Image (cartoon, rainbow, N blue to C red):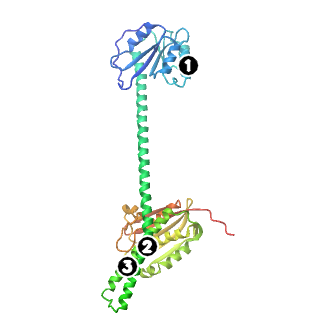
């Protein structure tokens, strides 16, 4: 092998943790030694393997992880083109770049045949040291970059698997904690009913006993009123907790064809005293969607909480006005409830739906009502949205998933 003697370029910059193997294939041992001597540089971390025939080259390629093959074209037995075709057609070796090393006169026919066989480049003898080393360095650097990328991907996948495992474990833990909490709420809301009923009965009996014994009640009547009020609030809280527990454990409620106006009239009748005391004005427009297929009990709970809250959290500067409207949007029947009350700061919008959270303390409440509404809506694949500004009132839009209404017979 004739080599044009010129100064060698600088050593390759390789990762010492990533050993690189380059296969040199030539039927003449002196050519292999000469080529290795040309390419070798101290500190390159490159191992040069020798093959003296095409068959031996294929065996090494199938066994080793190679960065590059420098393949002589003219060899007895299998020539370089045949070896390259075998490498190209094998799934294990098809991605190994092959550079042909040849003394054949540089002609287009030979070059075309070489590229068709799977070569990525040609080196023509006599070899130019700088060009030879530069080409080899390019493919080795591509190899090391590929390996670094594969390692990075492997580390990323491992990190993702570990993260997914931690998330799964944390989710299971939170699910268990949430289940325990729900079971506690469910149990407590039922087990506390009997004691509070007993307390209520004992207070009533105490009052009757004092009256029978002609005890003057004027001085302690206010205390009885305070106790009665506390018991009433406790009972309301238990009712709300029972409802939250019911929503978590319930099977799908039976859906009926329900009139929004019918439910609203029922709610207005239930809060009649509140409406009269505040001179509240309640208007509705159900013309676009007068009915919905939904659970009657759940729809009543939604409308009751939204309308009563619109009056309860009224502004002291104006009489309360609550406007209800329905319409259809993207497969949902939307119930819009707008009030002109105190309004809610934007940073507090999410808190509205948190259990036991009350943003205004001037009125009675358990802080559970909007949690119930949100769970009802989301349990039936709907959603609830809030638009509000402090001092300007609020608009709640409840998206109820539409179902096909049964035909009336």
Disc 3: which residue: 229
Q: Find numbered disc 1 in the image and state the secondary structure of the residue it sits on.
A: helix
Locate residue 394, reporting x and y percent.
Answer: 42, 68
- Tell me if 292 is positioned left or right of 99 in this view: right
State the residue at coordinates (35%, 79%): 227
- Whether residue 162 is visible here, answered yes or no, is yes
Disc 1: which residue: 86
- Whether residue 117 is visible here, answered yes or no, is no
Locate residue 383, reporting x and y percent.
Answer: 49, 61
Residue density around tag 1, few if under 14, some if 14–19, many if 20 or more, within 10 Å: some
Disc 2: which residue: 193
- The Cα–Cα distance between marks 3 and 2, rounded to whole angstroms, is 16 Å
Q: Nearer the viewer, mark 1 or mark 3?
A: 3
Q: Judge by depth and name the residue closer to the eye, 396 or 183.
A: 183
Identify the image quadrant of residue 135. Answer: top left
* Sequence-earlier tag: 3 or 2: 2
Locate residue 372, reporting x and y percent.
Answer: 46, 66
- Tell me if 194 is positioned left or right of 42 in this view: right
- Tell me if 3 is positioned left or right of 407 in this view: left
Q: Judge by depth and name the residue closer to the eye, 351 or 246.
A: 246
Q: Judge by depth and name the residue closer to the eye, 320 or 352.
A: 352
Q: Are marks 2 and 1 in contact (CB under 8 Å)?
A: no
Quick one: quadrant of the C terminus?
bottom right
Residue density around tag 2, few if under 14, some if 14–19, many if 20 or more, within 10 Å: some
Q: Nearer the viewer, mark 2 or mark 1?
A: 2
* Sequence-earlier tag: 2 or 1: 1
- The Cα–Cα distance between marks 1 and 3, rounded to whole angstroms, is 92 Å
Locate residue 231, reporting x and y percent.
Answer: 39, 77
């Amino acid at each position: 092998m004739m080599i044009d003697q010129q100064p060698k370029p600088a050593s390759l910059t390789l990762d010492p943790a990533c050993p690189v193997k380059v296969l040199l294939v030539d039927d003449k041992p002196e050519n292999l030694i000469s080529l290795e001597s040309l390419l070798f540089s101290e500190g390159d971390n490159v191992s040069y393997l020798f093959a003296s025939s095409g068959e031996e080259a294929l065996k090494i390629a199938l066994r080793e992880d190679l960065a590059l093959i420098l393949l002589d074209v003219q060899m007895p037995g299998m020539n370089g083109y045949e070896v390259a075709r075998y490498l190209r057609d094998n799934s294990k070796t098809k991605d190994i770049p092959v550079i042909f090393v040849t003394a054949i006169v540089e002609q287009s026919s030979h070059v075309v045949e070489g590229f068709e066989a799977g070569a990525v480049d040609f080196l023509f003898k006599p070899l130019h040291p700088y060009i030879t080393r530069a080409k080899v360095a390019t493919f080795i650097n591509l190899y090391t970059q590929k390996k670094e990328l594969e390692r990075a991907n492997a580390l990323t996948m491992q990190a993702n698997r570990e993260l997914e495992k931690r998330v799964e474990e944390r989710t299971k833990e939170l699910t268990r904690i949430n289940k325990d909490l729900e079971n506690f709420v469910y149990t407590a809301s039922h087990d506390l009913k009997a004691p509070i009923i007993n307390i209520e009965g004992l207070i009533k009996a105490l009052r009757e006993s004092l009256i029978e014994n002609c005890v003057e009640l004027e001085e302690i009547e206010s205390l009885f009123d305070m106790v009665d009020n506390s018991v009433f609030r406790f009972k309301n809280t238990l009712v709300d907790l029972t409802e939250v527990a019911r929503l978590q454990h319930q099977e799908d409620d039976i859906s009926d064809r329900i009139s929004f106006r019918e439910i609203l009239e029922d709610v207005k009748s239930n809060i009649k005293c509140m409406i009269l005391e505040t001179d509240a004005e309640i208007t509705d427009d159900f013309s676009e969607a007068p009915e919905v297929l939904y659970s009657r009990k759940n729809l009543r709970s939604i409308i009751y909480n939204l309308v009563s809250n619109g009056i309860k959290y009224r502004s002291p500067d104006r009489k309360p006005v609550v406007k209800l409207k329905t319409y259809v949007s993207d497969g949902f029947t939307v119930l819009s409830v707008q009030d002109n009350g105190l309004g809610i700061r934007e940073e507090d919008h999410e808190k509205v739906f948190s259990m036991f959270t009350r943003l205004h303390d001037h009125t009675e409440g358990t802080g559970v009502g909007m949690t119930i509404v949100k769970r009802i809506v989301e349990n039936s694949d709907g959603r609830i949205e809030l638009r509000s500004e402090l001092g300007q009132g609020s608009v709640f839009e409840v998206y109820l998933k539409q179902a096909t209404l049964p035909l009336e017979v």
